[in-house]
Image (tube, rainbow, N blue to C red):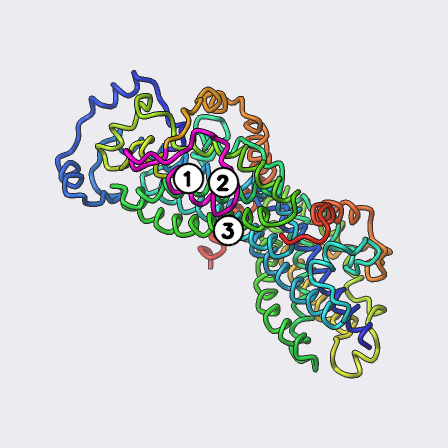
Amino acid sequence: MTKGLTRYLLALGDDALVSSQRMAWWISRSPQIEEDIAMANLGLDQLGQARSLLAYAGEVEGNGRSEDDLAYLRDERDFLNVCLVEREQKDFGVAMVRLLMFSAWQHELYAALTGSTDLTLAGVAGKAVKETAYHLDHAEHWVLRLGDGTEESHLRMQAALDAEWPWLAELFDNSFVNEDLLLQGIAIDPASLRESVEGRIAGVIGRATLARPDVADALSRGREGRHTEQMGYLLAEMQHLARSHPEVTW
Amino acid sequence: MYGNDYETPDAQRARQLEDTPESFRELLATEGRVEPRDEMPDAYRRTLVRQIAQHAHSEIIGMQPEGNWISRAPSLRRKAILMAKVQDEAGHGLYLYAAAETLGVDRADLLDALHSGRQKYSSIFNYPTLTWADVGAIGWLVDGAAIVNQVPLCRCSYGPYARAMVRVCKEESFHQRQGFEILHTLSHGSPAQKAMAQDAVDRYWFPALMMFGPPDDNSPNSARSMAWGIKRHSNDDLRQRFVDMTVPQAQALDLTLPDPEIRWNEDRGHHDFAEIDFTELFEVIKGNGPCNQQRMEHKVRAHEEGAWVREAAAAFAAKQAAGEGAA
């Protein structure tokens, strides 16, 4: 049970941490200054969620691991984030399509988790649900503008949507959630969010004059610690300094 | 103001021939604020546009050296602080472009001037951030020097610039304390951390001193900017103020400033310090610094790769406006 909760918290925390790491890449590389600021906000919110969730995971686990131990000293196979968020996103269209998917899912998830019987988790969700409402709004506006902007932007957004869509399904994978957590009202079954999340996304892409991709789901197994090849580089960059100086304070 | 603000003597002479409106002279004489709709000499307007734009460009380019460490920050807390700091710099850039726009220029044109090299940014950002400690040294020394330069600008004769600087200075002062705290942690940490901190200070000290610009006897625009109430103190005075402020802080950090000639001079009531070799500054201004090319390429690439996004946003807004017009 403790192990199940730790794993659940790590998975949600890793989603937020890894997404934040990708989001932060945009700071100084955005299409305009306002967006540099927005990307920093999004990344900071996600980083804040990650810190709360990882710190709590360490507490529940009971082995004295801090948020930094969990972020910096775990290896790739121990990270439980979905593959959706770990892949490079150096195209603004990809970044906004992915944010639409991820924030739609996070928003539904956190909204449901505000009713968790675990009061710490409910508290984290209570803060995060407000943040993800803004993230979703931001992503929706950009997908609309870019989908229904110029001919070029329309083509690019359709390509981005086609590329990201196969990685959406893993958000609804519930194989990593311990059944007892569901029975006790601590966790939310991600599969139960599918209809509302997909409905939300479908509404936006329809208004953005984009077509729902007709593509197969990717074999995405991040929840089992089986990642894409891009994950190793992300961690190598993120962790190297902390690992080069073990046992020190920063 | 960052030591890149030069123009030819001919251009200066041409500008001094221009008339100065009476109302403008009165405002300056009474320490009033010039506001966007007030009469002002064209040369005053042009000087301000150039200075504010250069300041805005510096904030924007300045995001890069520190942004270089966001992905590698050694703790999640430090990562969050650094992201927020670089975000603040983007915010400063925005206020400053907005302040420049009150003088009748357009942000897009100023960015074009930056991208084509017609306008400059502070040379300090052409140095690389090689270690995590550089993030601390930039906060402590570079932001520290910027504050000394910028606090007097809160009383600048041009209202929108002065008001923007009030907020900028508050945030810069917060950044300076963060930088100090990073270095303090390192200098009281492991021997490797302390060495990292010392190395960063060794590399950033003289470039930070050069941020105040060339010595007063070689600073072509200073006198006129002072007469216009844009500049309040000379380069050398500000540099001295910075040294006096920083020496005791270095002692508190238990780090050494890389200048054996620094010592308190009882007669002057100031610290003496070594004569600065400005050859390097002029090389960096000419474009030969370690990162000049990299910083500009990064900025221009981001701008070009974002063009389709800005075009689409404009097209979408136009469609929406047309739709509303039709309805």
Q: Which residue is mark 1?
A: B145
Are discs 3 and 1 both within one chain? yes
Q: Amino acid at mark 3?
A: Gln
* C-alpha separation, residue under disc 3 versus residue under disc 1: 14 Å
Instruction: For the residues labelled 3 and 1, say whether their Cβ atoms are less than 8 Å apart.
Output: no
* C-alpha separation, residue under disc 2 versus residue under disc 3: 20 Å
* C-alpha separation, residue under disc 2 versus residue under disc 1: 17 Å
Q: Which residue is mark 3?
A: B178
| Side (left or right) of B247 relative to A122 | left
Q: Which chain does the numbered disc 1 sit on?
A: B
Q: Which residues are magenta?
A: B243-271
Is B197 in the magenta?
no
Q: Which residue is mark 2?
A: B60
Are discs 2 and 1 both within one chain? yes
SS state under label 1: helix
Q: Earlier in the sequence, mark 2 or mark 3?
A: 2
Residue visible at 80% across and 62% down in the picture? A170
Q: Amino acid at mark 2?
A: Ile
Instruction: For the residues labelled 2 and 3, say whether their Cβ atoms are less than 8 Å apart.
Output: no
- In the depicted structure, whether residue A203 falls above or below residue B79: below
Are discs 2 and 3 both within one chain? yes
Instruction: For the residues labelled 2 and 1, say whether their Cβ atoms are less than 8 Å apart.
Output: no
Q: Position of residue A109 (x, y in %)?
A: 69, 71
Q: Position of residue B23 (x, y in %)?
A: 14, 39
**Quarter-of-image position of residue B215:** top left
Circle 2 residues within 10 Å: few <14, some 14–19, many ≥20? many
Q: Position of residue B199 (x, y in %)?
A: 58, 36
Circle 1 residues within 10 Å: few <14, some 14–19, many ≥20? many
